[in-house]
Amino acid sequence: MRAQFPGGTIGTAGLAAVCAALLLSACGGESEELQQWMAQQRKEVKPSIEQIEAPKKFVPQAYSAITGTEPFSSQKLLIGSPLDNRQSNALLASETRRRKEPLEAYPLDSMAMVGSVTRQGRPYALIRVANLLHYVKAGAYLGQNYGKITRIGETEVDLREIVQDAAGEWVERIATLQLQ
């Protein structure tokens, strides 16, 4: 494209250069005004800076428990063990010496009572563990807390368990398996 002017013809590139020069000359006066306004605003506006508190001084404390038992020592870890001789008492002594029964390998909450049977005048409970049925009688052991069956009813099995309380003492607890 070519434009005709009284002095001759100008190409597209030349036309763009002429337009850019005209635009820049028109903005020249405004840029001075803009620069003056910016300088005036810098003088008038003062930034507000909040004071930050000085950091608190760190006072190191001496480790005073160095004479006590180390928290990760093997002695500390054995205190909660059911076989610890210092913690064991009369309740636990006879339980640790006897042979474990097969149903003591499973937690009590994985067992379900599914029925009861009377054979030769003695009540037996049907307990389902890992999709297998087991006949149990009073005096048998269930669960991982030394649970001994004390009574078998038509709809429930009562157990005596030996567990540690919050203070680490071994105490008896009564548990029940309900018919499902």
Image (cartoon, grey):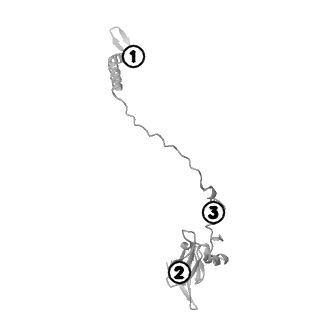
Q: Amino acid at mark 3?
A: Lys
**Which label sits in the foreground, 2 or 1?**
2
Residue visible at 59% across and 82% down in the picture = 135
**Which label sits in the foreground, 1 or 3?**
3
Q: Quadrant of residue 77?
A: bottom right
Name the N-terminal-most of marks 2 and 1. Answer: 1
The answer to whether residue 101 is visible is: no
Q: Quadrant of residue 134?
A: bottom right
* Residue at mark 3 to residue at mark 2: CA–CA distance: 34 Å
Name the N-terminal-most of marks 1 and 3. Answer: 1
Q: Residues within 10 Å of mark 3 (few under 14, many from 20)?
A: few
Depth check, front residue: 122 or 176: 176
Depth check, front residue: 96 or 144: 96
Q: Amino acid at mark 2?
A: Asp
Q: Which mark is residue 17?
A: 1
* Residue at mark 1 to residue at mark 3: CA–CA distance: 88 Å
Name the N-terminal-most of marks 3 and 2. Answer: 3
**Which label sits in the foreground, 3 or 2?**
3
Which residue carries the number 3 mark?
A: 76
Q: Locate the N terminus by quadrant.
A: top left
* Residue at mark 2 to residue at mark 1: CA–CA distance: 101 Å
Indicate the secondary structure of the residue bearing disc 3. helix
